[in-house]
Image (cartoon, rainbow, N blue to C red):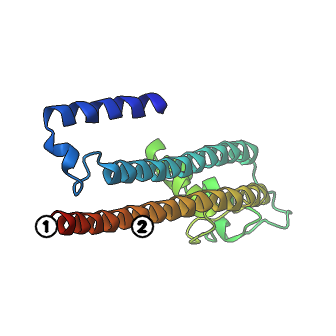
Amino acid sequence: MRFIKEKRTKLIEKQIELRPSLGDDVLEDHNNIETVLIISFTLKTLKLFVIIITFSFFFAMLFKVILEIEHDLYAGVEVPEGDIYYDPNPEVNECDDPAIGYFTKCFELGTRSNGNQLVLLLYYSFTSLSTVGFGDFYPRSNLERLMIAFFLLFGVAIFSYIMGIFIEILNKFQDLTAVLDDGEQLNSFMNIIKKFNMG
């Protein structure tokens, strides 16, 4: 950081040597401090969004692995006629009974393309982690419920931490812009005094 400041100072000194009028110009920001601050805060905010998307993607893929394990457990398992979950009426949807239906089967995840599955699971992961939960997709089996409860516990902690950092960034930006505004007002005041003293 010190190296960058030294290079920047040398560059400004060189510009003043080439155009001495820049040294007397106190009204214009030749260092572009405000632009640098805006870019800095924009990059910090973008970093937070990348972290949120990364966590959502990680939990979506972890949930997909759990769903594949669950699908392998239930694949080929038929409910015997004497079982309490046996329904002699085949027209009834198994997804209406949470004891039989599970996420992959009820939301037809197996019939979707990989890209469609990724979008669906990323959306489900993001809405679950952010504790919004629209209810269009929801856990069906006990294994899924346990996994989502675990995700929600971490989701609340992660999103609270990220929102705290975001609020801190906004507060710092507001403080710095207030300082810059005060500096501009002080600069204008000093120029008025300079004009009165010279006149």
**SS at badge 2:** helix
Give the distance between the C-alpha atoms of the residues marked 2 and 1, in whole angstroms: 32 Å
Near mark 2 (Cα within 10 A), the count class, few <14, some 14-19 or many ≥20, is few
| Type of amino acid under label 1 | Gly
Q: Which of 26 and 131 is in front in this view?
A: 26
> Which residue has dot 1 on it?
199
Residue 65 position within the rendered picture, expressed as x and y whole percent measured from the top left: 66, 42
Q: Nearer the viewer, residue 160 or 110?
A: 160
| N-terminal-most mark, 2 or 1 | 2
Q: Is residue 193 left or right of residue 153?
A: left
Label 2 close to label 1 by CB (< 8 Å): no
> Which residue has dot 2 on it?
178
Q: How many marks?
A: 2
Mark yes or no: residue 107 visible: no
**SS at badge 1:** loop
Q: Nearer the viewer, residue 5 or 106?
A: 5
Residue 91 to residue 80: above or below: below
| Type of amino acid under label 2 | Ala
Q: In which quarter of the image is residue 152?
A: bottom right
In the image, which is nearer the foreground, mark 2 or mark 1?
1
Q: Quadrant of the C terminus?
A: bottom left
* Label of residue 98 in the image: none
| Residue at x 48%, y 49% (from the top left corner) | 44
Mark yes or no: residue 115 visible: yes
Q: Which of 69 and 148 is in front in this view?
A: 148
Residue 28 position within the rendered picture, expressed as x and y whole percent measured from the top left: 22, 54
